Image (cartoon, helix red, strand yellow):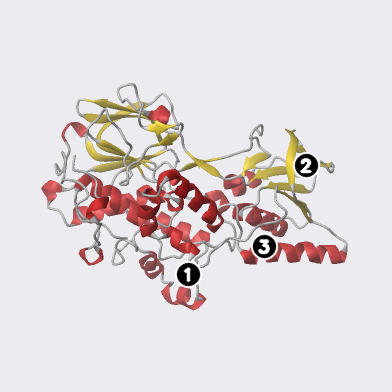
Amino acid sequence: MTKDELVNGGDRHLGSGECADGEVDILGIGFGPSNLSLAIAIEELNERRPAGRRLTARFVDARRQFGWHDGMLLPGATMQISFLKDLVSPRTPTSSFTFLNYLHEQGRVSDFINLKTFFPTRREFHGYLSWAASRIDLPVSYGTRATRIDWSGGRFEVTLESVVDGSEVTKVAARHVVIGSGSRPVLPEGIEPGPRVFHNHQLLNRLAELPSRTNGRFLVVGSGQSAAEVAAYLHDSYPDAEVHASFRRYGYTPSDDTPYANRIFDPEAVDEFYTAPPELKQQLLDYHWQTNYSAVDADLIEDLYRREYDEGTRGVRRLIVHRVTGIERLSEGSDGVTVTIRDLGNRGSTTLEVDAAIFATGFRPADTRGMLGPSIDGSSSFEGDRPIVERDYRLRLRSVPERIFFNGGVLHSHGLTSSLLSNVAIRAADILRAITGEQPDHPATRQRLPAANRTDPR
């Protein structure tokens, strides 16, 4: 990705080392992979700075401990992106935080090489992320939720509350805020979560907590990778149960992971997408949606089809696919879930009693409008619930001189990579450079942005 060393006009109010009055230069809200990558970039930048000019930073996360889609760490499930797109390698391949260095410290480099794959299991990559998080020296407050951002006395004042004890409220002053709070699971309209009705991201934990399993059936709703993985996992793990899959399509659709299509995830594609007119943005999203969303690895599709076909030859059906269907009614009881699956062509319906209904129905970015307190005029900062974000990921704010950044969740302005792992290392560099005006990666990896792509000094 072509980038300039100085996207902004140097350190504004930075380089204080220990901040006065308990302030920090950067407060990160959320500590998933995106802000974890930012924390690494901050620490590596500080290593090259004299003690008096090092940045201070703090991160908060509502979870009790670090985690990344813990409920979907299914046996054998692999990543859909190369391990080279880890937290740091696209920015600083010589960093000690690379996936390869993780393998080295675990004594698994040779064994991994012998796998002949670019795609580690999701469980192993979770181990890598947890390892990286444990090595961060910057303070991280788990079990802490940020509820409001105000502007007071030339700085942001962020209200925090304990997830454990909501009455415990504190405030932290910050010169810049980086929101990396991730996405929120989506359930279809009218579906209320319960012990037996839940989103797939909670799968393993919720299955372990099922109060009983007397119906011998599960329902999986959705047509993407997660839905297919859940159906396969349930089919393997509960050999005495039927697995019903319902989706609006005729069948699972294969994901497009061909080399040319994958260029939509290249760092350069962010510049191209951001500068595209609105109609072209939407066309690019439509063209390439199936590189990641509502699509399934071809090998998994074939595996599920073979299971269904084989059961048909034996006359014993456990994997039942309800194509071109939707959920008409659903009610949860103490002993199960009663669900009516309706054919979308008005060709009848099927009512089932299932032990659990799992909805693999995707995620949406968190709505951050309510986080801005009355002291911050955000009237020109959103279009509906979508933030208006500059190329360097800062929210367009007219009322305050400093900046709030979005570390992810800006698909509408920055393209498909904004909610995925592919670009976390480069995006962290963009944000940190916008704050400091300094290149946060190793000199050997420096690249330059054309002058037209620079933001104006502030």
Instruction: Give the left or right position of residue 408, taking residue 431 as reference.
Output: right
For the C terminus, the image quarter is top left
Instruction: Residue 121: give x, y in percent of width and height.
Output: 52, 63
Q: Amino acid at mark 1?
A: Phe
N-term mark: 1 or 3: 1
N-term mark: 1 or 2: 1
Residue at image x 48%, y 42%?
183
Nearer to the camera, 128 or 443: 443
User: Distance between the Cα atoms at labels 1 and 2?
Assistant: 39 Å
Neighbour class for label 1 at 10 Å: few (<14), some, many (≥20)? Answer: some
Above or below, 147 relative to 94: above
Nearer to the camera, 265 or 149: 265
Instruction: Residue 64: give x, y in percent of width and height.
Output: 45, 41
- The residue singled out by tag 3 in the image is 301
Nearer to the camera, 417 or 201: 417
N-term mark: 2 or 3: 3
- The residue singled out by tag 2 in the image is 341
- The residue singled out by tag 1 in the image is 118
Q: Amino acid at mark 2?
A: Ile
Instruction: Give the left or right position of residue 229, taking residue 407 as reference.
Output: right
Q: Secondary structure at mark 1?
A: loop
Which mark lies nearer to you, 1 or 2? Answer: 2
